[in-house]
Amino acid sequence: MNFKNMTLLRVFHFSTVFILGLFVMTLHAETGEKDINYEKIGIPEGVDPIAETYMPVVASDFETVKAKDVEDKPMIMKRQKDLLERRYDLSNMPSDVMMSGGRKAVQKGVRVKLPEGMTWEKLAGMSPAEIKEKGLFPEGFLPLPHAKHETGGQVFPQNHIDQIMTLEKRSLKRFDVEFDLPDHLMPEFPPPIFISTRPDLGDVSQGKLLSIDNYYEIMHGILTPVQMEGLRLLLTPFPQQQFNQTDDRKVEAPSLGVSCLDCHANGHTNAAFHLNPDTRPQIARFRLDTVSLRGMFNQQIHGSKRSLRSIEDFTEFEQRTAYFDGDHVIAAKKGVNLPDRASQVAMMAQMQNIFDFPPAPKLDTFGRLDPNKATEQELKGEEVFFGKGRCAECHPSPFYLDDKMHDLKVGRFYKPEMINGQYNISDGPIKTFTLRGIKDSPPYMHDGRCLTLEDTVELFNLVTRLNLTKEEKDALTAFMRQL
Ligand code: HEC
Ligand code: HEC
């Protein structure tokens, strides 16, 4: 056989294999079959994991996907509303304690609903195994699914969407899903800003939301050039999974992206949420409620699961991976921004490191209550916190965090099941969050499953087997509102 013939034969051979391959792939796609090893990835037989490790890079065309998403949205939002109403009392019950900016009341009351015929006391008297067996774990203490878990991604509250539209004419509105919690259960907006370099000034926000349009005017004269440049970068939008310029986006017009402070509004949080980048498959990922950046200067580990060791690392990896669901492959397609470590990341970190906790006028230098300023009930709460409640073992003063990850083993109380697109396996180890300034950052826990501080007290009472009295629980809440 001469050379030419061999090449022809090869071409023939390759094209046959290629065409056959395509045929098989089409068949697979049409029947929706995937080769899934259910046992290996630990999910129920027959359930679509959606994405196993990697996300699909090539999607159907934008208009087709969008039409389907828009059509599905009312159904998706109703599904989430039904879940929230089944789980919680969502009513507006302000307490007489205000958040740090003095513009919004801290909400009160246990909001998680009990199963029919149960009381908190009865439930706390049962063993985890019995609660699990009888299916009595209050549904509101289960992992909270993302409003559209199947797609996940960043979802911003309406107040932030409106402000950014007014200030920057940039749309943070998705067409497939919207924010799911009522405004009174969210942080004050815009939140006040306290900076560790100028405690004498108090709130430096002037009641405004920092954006790329106004930051210079608001901060001029009170930041160093390095901090100012860091702030500029924290307010500059960069491409992200749902907000970008490709046909794989969830915003009407191609978008410049999102900025760090679109979630960490004014260095705090506006309760924007997304899915954690760390877990697979998709259905086993968990919702993440945005954490505050206040007091970050004292924290040694970052991220509920990732446990990154510096604020610089976290800053670098937010855009590299978290913005793209922990998938660096799809990030390349959508225009990932890789900030320069030595200059940009360092300055962004320096700015983040001066966002301070809000003042806590009743705390002394050791972070303990001043008996001359605190009420009887708050002092009683402090006693429970450091004593019978054992809270301080993981939340020691003065910063009320231990820089550790703990497994609360909430999975002892329920059997995993598929709920609204999420397969709710136990969370495993999660970073302890600080309780300084905690009244300002509802909802609580990594996924926001607890709407009030009262809810967190009932959760810990069950999970760490405390058997607290009603009086002790109320005192604990009163104490935490002063931190
Ligand atoms: C979807 C909104 C969102 C955006 C945008 C965002 N973050 Fe975050 N950020 C979060 C959430 C949610 C967490 C908690 C992550 C976790 O628990 O794993 C977090 C955690 C952090 C932490 C660690 C906090 C801690 O408690 O250890 C830092 C630091 C941080 N973000 C900085 C940034 C920077 C810098 C940017 C921009 C490059 C950014 N974030 C953009 C939502 C966001
Ligand atoms: C074994 C360690 C441990 C103990 C004991 C403990 N916590 Fe926590 N706490 C954690 C961890 C870990 C988280 C984050 C868990 C999560 O988000 O899933 C957390 C979260 C919280 C939160 C929510 C913080 C936020 O930003 O959303 C509150 C409030 C809280 N704890 C209060 C308490 C109280 C009150 C007690 C005592 C009754 C207590 N904790 C005991 C480890 C502990």
Image (cartoon, helix red, strand yellow):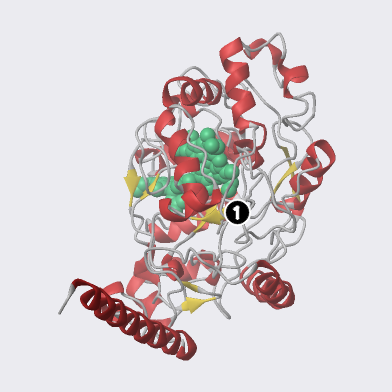
Residue depicted at x 71% and y 63%: 90
Quarter in which the C terminus is drawn? top right
Quarter in which the N terminus is drawn? bottom left
Camera-side residue of 448 and 302: 302
Q: Quadrant of residue 247?
A: bottom right
Camera-side residue of 434 and 315: 315
Q: Quadrant of residue 129?
A: bottom left
The answer to whether the residue bearing label 1 lies less than 8 angstroms from the nearest atom of ligand 1 is yes
Residue depicted at x 75% and y 40%: 189
Q: Quadrant of residue 112?
A: bottom right
Binning the other alpha carbons within 10 Å of mark 1 as few (below 14), some (14 to 19) or many (20 upward) gives: many
| Side (left or right) of 207 relative to 328 | right
| Side (left or right) of 474 relative to 422 | right
Residue depicted at x 64% and y 33%: 236
Can residue 30 be spotted in the picture? yes
In the rendered structure, which amino acid carries the disc numbered 1? Gln
Percent across and percent down for residue 278 are: 39, 54
Element on which disc 1 rests = loop
Residue at numbered disc 1: 154
Percent across and percent down for residue 180 are: 69, 62
